[in-house]
Image (spheres, grey):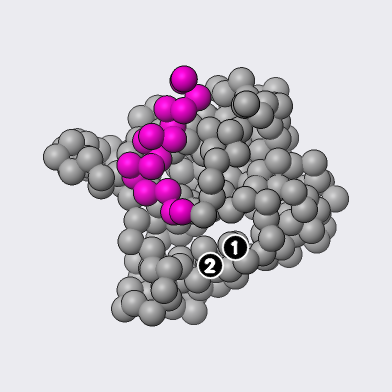
């Protein structure tokens, strides 16, 4: 049984991944309302969209009354670890994510949380890779917070396959190379639209959330709503 009339909160819609996921939500007949939580206006306008501006996402108390009645959060907010020290990366990845998650679960005790993590994330939190440990710590904490379901998405390479405002500039140059890598190594990544469809499918069908969704799982899940 598909759950429809979904009300989805999306973070990070001013970035490429969040915008791509938002686009799939706009196109999906299963999604009734899209709530965008951003530091600044995204510039996106649609009858489904309601945008909430919070200049300090570490402190969402001022907007918490607007964050109710939600079925799920698609958490697409994130930064690259390149050039970042561990404390800075931890603050903008772990602390920010958990701060927003706390507000959301307080306002929506039955909601799902969908966290876009990354291939190679270290669930043990003991490896040598700084970003992988921080991502693993974030995943583990989210799983402990009491959401009705908490999905961990590990997409690897994400290739934008539809026109977006926020496509990173280097994708225009390395896009053909990434497509070639994904062709010869299918498990290396997926199209951004496929990830968006998979997240909607998992939310609508209330799939199992106890495993991490790797590339092969993302592709398989994205096809479930076509059945």
Boundaries of the magenta span: 211-227
Q: Is the N terminus in the top left, top right, bottom left or bottom right quadrant?
A: top right
Q: Which mark is residue 153?
A: none
Q: Residue at x 51, y 54 (%)?
A: 210
Q: CA distance from mark 2 to mark 1?
A: 5 Å
Q: Position of residue 187 (x, y in %)?
A: 25, 45
Residue 214 covered by magenta stretch? yes
Please tell me whether the stretch drawn in magenta is mainly helix, strand or loop: helix
Q: Is the Cβ of the residue at disc 2 closer than 8 Å to that at disc 1?
A: yes
Secondary structure under badge 2? helix
Q: Is residue 95 left or right of residue 163?
A: right
Q: Which mark is residue 142?
A: 1
Q: Is residue 81 left or right of residue 151?
A: left
In this view, the residue in front, 92 or 141, is 141
Q: Residue at x 41, y 74 (%)?
A: 124
User: Please, is residue 169 above or below residue 115 in the view?
Assistant: above
Q: Position of residue 28 (x, y in %)?
A: 57, 23
Residue 104 covered by magenta stretch? no
Q: Which residue is mark 2?
A: 140
Image quarter for residue 49?
top right
Q: Position of residue 194 (x, y in %)?
A: 41, 33
């Amino acid at each position: 049984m598909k759950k429809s009339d979904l009300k989805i909160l999306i973070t990070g819609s001013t970035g490429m991944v969040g915008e791509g996921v938002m686009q799939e939500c706009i196109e999906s007949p299963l999604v009734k309302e899209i709530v965008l939580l951003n530091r600044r206006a995204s510039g996106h306008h649609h009858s489904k969209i309601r945008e909430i501006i919070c200049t300090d996402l570490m402190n969402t108390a001022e907007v918490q009354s607007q964050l109710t009645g939600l079925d799920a959060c698609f958490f697409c907010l994130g930064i690259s670890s390149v050039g970042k020290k561990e404390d800075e990366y931890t603050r903008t990845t772990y602390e920010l994510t958990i701060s927003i998650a706390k507000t959301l679960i307080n306002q929506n005790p039955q909601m799902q949380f969908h966290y876009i993590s990354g291939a190679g994330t270290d669930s043990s939190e003991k490896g040598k890779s700084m970003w992988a440990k921080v991502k693993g710590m974030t995943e583990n904490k989210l799983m402990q917070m009491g959401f009705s379901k908490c999905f961990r998405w590990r997409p690897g390479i994400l290739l934008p396959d539809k026109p977006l405002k926020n496509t990173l500039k280097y994708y225009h140059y390395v896009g053909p190379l990434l497509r070639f890598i994904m062709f010869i190594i299918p498990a290396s990544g997926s199209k951004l639209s496929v990830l968006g469809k998979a997240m909607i499918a998992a939310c609508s069908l209330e799939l199992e959330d106890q495993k991490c969704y790797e590339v092969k799982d993302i592709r398989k899940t994205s096809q479930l709503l076509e059945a």
